Image (cartoon, rainbow, N blue to C red):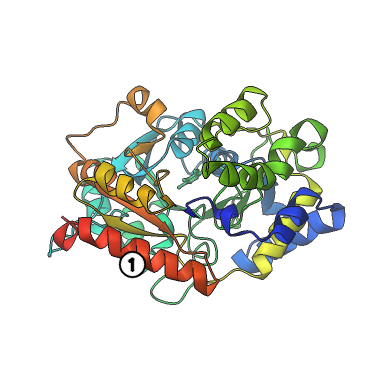
Amino acid sequence: MIFLGLASNYTARRTWHHAFALGNKKDYDSLEQELSRRYNANIDQLSLAFSGRSAIYLALESFIESGKMNKGDHVAINSFTCHAVLEAIERAGLEPVYVDLEKTISGQILPNYSADALEEIAKKDKKLKCFILQNTFGFAVDIRRFEKVKKNNNLLLLEDLAHCTGRKYPDGREIGTVGEATCLSFGKGKSIDTIIGGAVVLRDSSLKLPEEFDKNTLRHRKGGDVPRASWYPVFGAIARGLAHVYLDKPWLGLLLKLRWIERSADTKLLVDTSIAYWQARLALEQFNSLKNTALREFFLVDNRDACLKELRRHGYRLEESWYEVPVAPERYYKSVHFPEKQNPNAVFFAQHVINLPTWYHSNRKKKQVAKAKKIIKLHELKGGR
Ligand SMILES: Cc1ncc(COP(=O)(O)O)c(C=O)c1O
């Protein structure tokens, strides 16, 4: 079977390695040094964090405390994103401004907003002080055009690397080496995956970590969090086995009930807690073997339910597409009051998108993915419309 979960590609050895990984302060410090080297920032201007959303919140707070933004200012975000991004913005007392996805001249909708769309908003919205680029699925934007808009409108850039750690912009620069702040998520299924975790990197020398955040007193995740973070790949492997007899859902339901796992979108935003040493060690190993590949491939299909049903009949479980609504997950969507009329491309994209994993390496699995692609192609919208 082919699944969308990243850990479905783990060998038994890797799953075991994740479950029993050990680490120490040296691993934690080495990961911070790697971030400092990679994103060209001072070690005292960066920190590992509890989650990606905690990292985004800390970066935004640092903009506010340094006087570069005020509470109530606006932050431009992709109109096809995760609720986590919104949570961080709102917690910082800022307001999100959705920018609709780009539609090319040939009518194809892309998973990111364009520099032109950002410029149009920046010209009218005097409260807009910052924009977040997330390079959805790892598909990089034309950063040079964004840099012009940034300069012309005096905007701050926060690069959100949840989908794109290790990827490059078309001009060859690594994503995360351009803006004032770079935020990473090590959440489940992300480019660096330790199930929960993240990092904030302030790249502008005039910024410092917010006052409420004290690197020296951070609690490290221990005991109580262990089942979820370290055993998740094992639980996932069992779920995939049970999927053959349609018992995966009750199994995951039981784990949720026992609070041994948590839905990814429900990861907490914490500023007094960091990742565990063993997670730092795993993250560092993954940094050292990062490949410049997109996180997921995407296609727009005519009737997603019909396509997923057909795929399921052939042994593909691709239901957990990013994202099924413009601000995912669906269970929070209503409460977000997403302005659908102003963002028609995002609404359309979220209704029709289907994802394929990019991380299968064995020839047998690659052939299976190629077969899935053939099925998807039969349902594909012509020209991405
Ligand atoms: C684009 C994007 N940014 C940030 C995050 C936040 O990640 P975390 O769950 O680690 O808070 C997510 C989570 O899915 C995401 O999709």
When asked about the image quadrant of residue 57, the answer is top right
Q: Nearer the viewer, residue 275 or 314?
A: 314
Q: Residue furthest front?
A: 245
- Residue 273 left/right relative to 78: right
Work out whether 258 lies above or below 276.
above
When asked about the image quadrant of residue 50, the answer is top right
- Counting every numbered tag in the picture gives 1
Q: Residue at x 43, y 61 (%)?
A: 138
Helix, strand or loop status at disc 1: loop
Instruction: Report whether residue 379 is seen.
Output: yes
Q: Residues within 10 Å of mark 1 (few under 14, many from 20)?
A: some
Q: Identify the residue under disc 1.
A: 142
- Residue 271 left/right relative to 304: right
Amino acid on which the number 1 mark rests in the picture: Asp
Q: Residue at x 48, y 37 (%)?
A: 84
Q: Residue at x 77, y 44 (%)?
A: 276
Q: Nearer the viewer, residue 169 or 144?
A: 169
Q: Residue at x 69, y 46 (%)?
A: 234
Work out whether 61 lies above or below 3.
above
- Residue 338 left/right relative to 104: right
Point out residue 218 in the picture as x, y percentages from the top left corner: 78, 38
- CB of residue at label 1: within 8 Å of ligand 1? no
Point out residue 193 in the picture as x, y percentages from the top left corner: 62, 53
Quadrant of image for the C terminus: bottom left
Point out residue 44 in the picture as x, y percentages from the top left corner: 72, 53
Q: Nearer the viewer, residue 342 or 82?
A: 82
